[in-house]
Amino acid sequence: MRAARPSRWMASVGMLALGLALATAGRAQPLPRLPGEFVFPAKGSPGPVVFDHRSHVDLQRPNCTSCHPGLFSILKPGTPADGLAMGHKQMQRGKQCGACHNGKAAFASSGGTKCMTCHRAGAR
């Protein structure tokens, strides 16, 4: 028995779908909206740490999986995935924020020269 051939219309629809899939492959879709600032309390420091997604996410190529869920919970804001308390001790070990803020991928979290970039006096 011979297989039925698709009609020209079906073949055209299939080619159109394939063309659209190839044209949009690899393109990041825009995020509907980013979460607002998150304030981490930081006892004994120059001020709380204020995290803003806008300064950490490339809006042209958003990649939430860079941090979620490996470094931070996406369902519990401000909760490290490793369950350890936030702080420079963990960051110096390359954990939490220190996974990127190591002086290579992003400015280092130690050294004291950029404290006020993250720690903001007067933040709630």
Image (tube, rainbow, N blue to C red):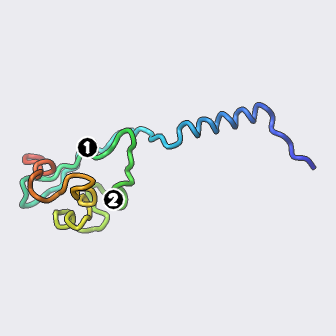
**From what the image shows, is residue 67 above or below residue 58?**
below
Residue found at x 11% / y 52%: 115
Q: Position of residue 34 (x, y in %)?
A: 32, 42
Q: Residue at x 70, y 37 (%)?
A: 14
Q: Nearer the viewer, residue 7 or 38?
A: 7
Cα–Cα span, label 1 and label 2: 19 Å
- Number of on-image labels: 2
Residue 36: percent from left, percent from top: 26, 43
Instruction: Residue type at mark 1: give it.
Output: Ser
Q: Between 88 and 33, which is closer to the camera in this rendering?
A: 88
Q: Residue at x 39, y 48 (%)?
A: 63
Left or right: where does residue 96 sit relative to residue 124?
right
Q: Dot 1, how many residues are within 10 Å of its Cα: few (below 14), some (14-19), or many (20+)?
A: few
Q: Are marks 1 and 2 in contact (CB under 8 Å)?
A: no
Q: In this view, does 39 lie to the left or right of 13?
A: left
Residue kind at label 2, given as amino acid type: Ser
State whether residue 70 is above or below residue 116.
Answer: below
* Mark 1 or 2, closer to the camera: 1
Residue 100 falls in which quadrant of the image?
Answer: bottom left
Q: Where is residue 90 in the image (x, y as percent from the top left)?
A: 21, 66
Is residue 57 toward the left or the right of residue 48 in the image?
right
Identify the residue position indicated by label 1 in the image.
55
Q: In which quarter of the image is residue 40?
A: bottom left
Q: Label 2: how many residues lie within 10 Å, few (<14), some (14-19) or many (20+)?
A: some
Q: Residue furthest right?
A: 1
**Residue named by callout 2:** 73
